[in-house]
Image (spheres, rainbow, N blue to C red):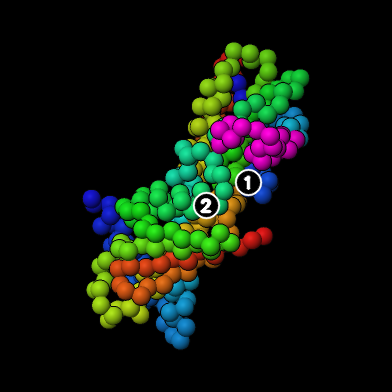
């Protein structure tokens, strides 16, 4: 599938570009938040398209399930492997073979570069949720390379 | 056909509102504003069957003497309101549905436009185009 490769190339090129544009002390933090904001806007647009023909969501969990199944399949060609929640507004989405990390070597060598490759996706999820009326904070963590966990903290109004 | 079309944001402020008889525009603003209460009531779904409220199209919100007001709410809680002349009795439910469908398609295009800022009033030609075709329809019928 050609579009998959295009997305991956574009994504790594964006990271490369933003990384080279930022110089100085706080470069890494700035770079991550820029990518995150980019993802946010993309997520807002995408979810508008994906939910065009779906029935109205019942609750928060229904929204999360949609993100894990339909949204993830459309963007990353696979579903989230594991969704866990404490039923108090924290959701953990686990992907055992995250597509944007598969191009990086699986060892510990590039572990420090992983946050840059996850920032866009964090924003993507946050944007999607915010457009569906769920305000949240999304963080990501990686312990072993192609696997990663996204933690979604819902902000109660 | 349709005499007024409105797109209302999640936070209930108008993103886009156009009506065909431009002299009575304020009246339509009031009509659309009033309809928001009915929309709110319908999507909160008090004492309604679940299957009923899961559809995006809400159907007839309320009829007035001269007009009928129809509503539609997207998953992102953006509301569409279409006001139709009630003298036009031949208008079927699925025609209204397809009008909303078109409007929703145009709205998604606007949302996916990278130069559009979510939450800003819509000035894009896309929705205008859609509203335009609907109002042209109105002119040819009468």
Viewer-closest of A7 and B26: A7
Query: Compared to A140, does A84 lie above or below?
Result: above
Label 1 residue SS: loop
Q: Chain of mark 2?
A: A
Quadrant in which the C terminus of chain A appears: bottom right
Residue B85, can we see it?
yes
- Which residue is the site of mark 2? A61
Query: Which residue corresponds to the image point at 65% horizontal and 23% vertical from the top-left?
Result: B84
| CA separation in Å, label 2 and label 1 | 24 Å
Query: Compared to A57, does A126 lie above or below?
Result: below
Quarter-of-image position of residue B8:
top right
- Which residue is the site of mark 1? B9
- The mark total stands at 2
Q: Position of residue A64 (x, y in %)?
A: 49, 53
Q: Magenta residues?
A: B34-54
Viewer-closest of B49 and A72: B49
Q: Position of residue B106 (x, y in %)?
A: 49, 38
Quarter-of-image position of residue B54:
top right
Viewer-closest of A81 and A37: A81
Q: Position of residue B109 (x, y in %)?
A: 47, 43
Both on one chain, marks 2 and 1? no
Label 2 residue SS: helix
């Amino acid at each position: 599938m050609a579009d998959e490769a295009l997305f991956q190339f574009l994504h790594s090129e964006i990271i490369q570009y933003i990384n080279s544009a930022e110089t100085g002390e706080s470069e890494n933090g700035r770079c991550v938040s820029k990518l995150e904001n980019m993802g946010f806007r993309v997520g807002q647009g995408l979810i508008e398209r994906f939910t065009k023909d779906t029935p109205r969501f019942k609750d928060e969990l229904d929204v999360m399930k949609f993100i894990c199944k339909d949204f993830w399949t459309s963007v990353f060609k696979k579903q989230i492997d594991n969704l866990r929640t404490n039923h108090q507004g924290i959701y953990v989405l686990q992907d055992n073979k995250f597509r944007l990390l598969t191009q990086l070597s699986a060892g510990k060598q590039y572990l420090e570069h992983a946050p840059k490759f996850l920032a866009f996706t964090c924003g993507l999820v946050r944007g999607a949720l915010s457009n569906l009326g769920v305000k949240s904070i999304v963080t990501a963590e990686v312990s072993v390379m192609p696997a990663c966990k996204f933690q979604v903290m819902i902000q109660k109004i | 056909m349709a005499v007024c079309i409105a797109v209302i944001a999640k936070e209930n402020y108008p993103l886009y509102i156009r009506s065909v008889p431009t002299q009575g525009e304020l009246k339509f603003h009031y009509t659309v504003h009033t309809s928001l209460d009915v929309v709110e009531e319908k999507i909160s779904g008090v004492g309604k069957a679940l299957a009923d409220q899961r559809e995006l199209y809400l159907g007839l919100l309320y009829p007035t003497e001269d007009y009928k007001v129809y509503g539609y709410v997207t998953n992102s809680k953006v509301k569409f309101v279409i006001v139709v002349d009630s003298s036009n009795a031949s208008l079927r439910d699925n025609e209204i549905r397809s009008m909303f469908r078109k409007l929703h398609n145009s709205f998604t295009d606007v949302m996916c436009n990278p130069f559009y800022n979510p939450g800003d009033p819509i000035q894009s030609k896309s929705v205008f185009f859609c509203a335009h075709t609907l109002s042209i329809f109105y002119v040819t019928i009468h």
